[in-house]
Image (cartoon, helix red, strand yellow):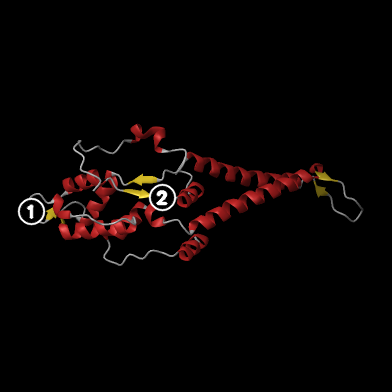
Amino acid sequence: PKGTKQAALRPPPTRTQMGKADCPWVVPAEQHLDLIWFRKVFDKLSNAGEAPVPLLKLQKTMCRLFRVLDADCDFNPRTYDDKRIGVVTWWEFCLIWRDWDLAIRLSLVERVHLTFEDPHSSRIGRLASLLVLGAIVLSATSFMVSTLPSMQDPPACEECEPTPFQVFEDIDTVCVVLFTVEYVVRLFTAAFMRTELTQQNDLINIITSDEAIRIPSRIQRVMAFALA
């Protein structure tokens, strides 16, 4: 591990303590797995906390976690079995969380994808979402206003129909370009986005399952995004 810390276990921050710091300006490169997440893993392995977790099951779960995180697994569960009884309790899980300080490390492309895909991931993501929403409202409003006779140029001939002012066409063009760029960026970055890491419940199911870990290819990730 990174080194055993002698300090007391730090409890997860409350909603009041997190405040505005819970939403950074940009998507962080590292997202640490908190104690609440480890509690969910423990409950899944121990039948809702009713029984301790065998060392073999702990070893398998941690190795699968390291596999998904794309890290070397040098975890030894016997380190946390001081009584040599072959099982660990919630207290040992707290020590594992403290000692290893595991985190999901996101690439730059993944952070860009989350910025556009999840407005709650960062403040820039919220601004981007508001920009796209504003463009949708502007485009719809512009189209409705352009149908008013007072917002149209007179017809060039008797058989011609009046045309909306040029400004409405310019607004529509800008909005279409914005929508296209936003979707293309999301589609391209979806090929590199490991969605199994951003969904905590899915990640828990993967590492606690007995099925083989199947990592989707980039084409499969793009197809999943396009069909979602």
- The quarter holding residue 212 reads bottom left
**What residue is shown at x 88% (from left), y 54% (from top)?**
160
Residue matched to label 1: 84
The Cα–Cα distance between marks 1 and 2, rounded to whole angstroms, is 37 Å
For this orientation, the residue located farthest to the right is 158
Left or right of 25 in this view: 162: right
Query: Which mark is first along the chain, 2 or 1?
Result: 1
Residue type of the residue flagged with mark 2 = Leu
Residue matched to label 2: 106
Q: Position of residue 75 (x, y in %)?
A: 22, 54
For disc 1, the neighbor class at 10 Å (few under 14, some 14 to 19, many from 20) is few
Q: Do the residues under discs 1 and 2 have CB atoms within 8 angstroms? A: no
Left or right of 157 in this view: 74: left
For this orientation, the residue located farthest to the bottom is 212
**What residue is shown at x 68% (from left), y 44% (from top)?**
141
Q: Secondary structure at mark 2?
A: loop
**What residue is shown at x 12% (from left), y 51% (from top)?**
81
